[in-house]
Amino acid sequence: KDSSLLPYGKHLKSLIGSKNLREELTTWSLSRESNLIEEGHRKELVPLVVRLLIPKVRNLKTLASRK
């Protein structure tokens, strides 16, 4: 495992599981101003979060278009 991702393991697992996804998105801020993510970790963490979320957003968009 990458040491820059270990401190955020709980958050990442919540993003993977659909049960806690909405809550995690509202409570875990990725912004620089929040200071929740160390600057050195940001380079690896943010692209991973994006890769986790894009399929979920696409799925929601597909479901919404079926209505």
Image (cartoon, helix red, strand yellow):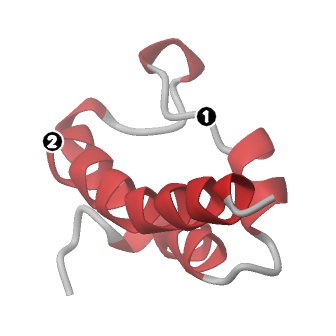
Q: Nearer the viewer, residue 22 or 40?
A: 22
Q: Residue at x 49, y 34 (%)?
A: 30
Task: In the rendered view, tell whether residue 47 sits above or below residue 59.
Answer: above
Q: Nearer the viewer, residue 4 or 31?
A: 31
Query: Residue 57: percent from the left, percent from the top?
Result: 54, 55
Snapshot quadrant of residue 39: top left
Give the Cα separation between the discs numbered 2 and 1: 15 Å
Q: Is residue 3 left or right of residue 60?
A: left
The image quadrant where one finds the C terminus is bottom right
Task: In the rendered view, tell whether residue 43 sits above or below residue 39.
Answer: below
Task: In the rendered view, tell whether residue 49 sits above or below residue 14.
Answer: above
Question: Residue at label 1?
Answer: 29
Task: In the rendered view, tell whether residue 57 sits above or below residue 41.
Answer: below
Snapshot quadrant of residue 46: top left
Circle 2: residue type: Lys
Q: Is residue 54 left or right of residue 67?
A: left
Query: Residue 31: percent from the left, percent from the top?
Result: 49, 22
Q: Nearer the viewer, residue 8 or 54?
A: 54
Q: Earlier in the sequence, mark 2 or mark 1?
A: 1
Q: Secondary structure at mark 1?
A: loop
In the drawing, what numbered circle is on residue 43?
2
Circle 1: residue type: Ser
Q: Residue at x 80, y 57 (%)?
A: 22
The image quadrant where one finds the N terminus is bottom left
Q: Secondary structure at mark 2?
A: helix
Q: Residue at x 72, y 55 (%)?
A: 64
Query: Residue 43: percent from the left, percent from the top?
Result: 15, 41
Q: Residue at x 69, y 65 (%)?
A: 63
